[in-house]
Amino acid sequence: MRLDRRQLHAEEAQWTRRHLLLVEKGVVIDAFHQGILSQSIQEKLLADIDAQLLGLESGEPGKSLEPGQ
């Protein structure tokens, strides 16, 4: 199957957003381990990131990290 440029761009953008969310998740976990974030803040941030990842993977609009957010 041959993908056109728009499909390739969309897939690359999705991969990039997913990668950035995973990096953000790692930063939140590290900040908690360093004592910078409380457990309640860490849990809230991780829940938000996980919701964005789930939305990105399910293709739900508004649930993923869109450029400019």
Image: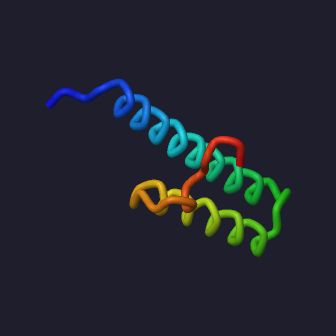
Q: Residue at the spot x=59%, y=48% of the render? A: 21
Q: Residue at the spot x=65%, y=48% of the render? A: 24
Outermost residue to the right: 36
Q: Residue 51 appears at what percent x and percent y?
A: 55, 66
Outermost residue to the bottom: 40
- In the image, is residue 15 above or below residue 43? above
- In the image, is residue 8 above or below residue 17? above
Q: Residue at the spot x=62%, y=53% of the render? A: 25
Q: Residue 62 appears at what percent x and percent y?
A: 57, 60
Outermost residue to the left: 1
Q: Residue 9 appears at what percent x and percent y?
A: 43, 29
Q: Which picture quadrant has residue 5?
A: top left
Q: Is residue 9 left or right of residue 31?
A: left
Q: Residue 4 appears at what percent x and percent y?
A: 29, 26
Q: Nearer the viewer, residue 28 or 8?
A: 8
Q: Nearer the viewer, residue 46 or 48?
A: 48
Q: How is the image coloured?
A: rainbow
Q: Which picture quadrant has residue 44?
A: bottom right
Q: Nearer the viewer, residue 13 or 25?
A: 13
User: In which quadrant of the rendered image does the N terminus lie?
Assistant: top left
Number of numbered markers: 0
Q: Is residue 1 left or right of residue 63?
A: left
- In the image, is residue 61 above or below residue 10? below
Q: Residue at the spot x=61%, y=47% of the render? A: 66
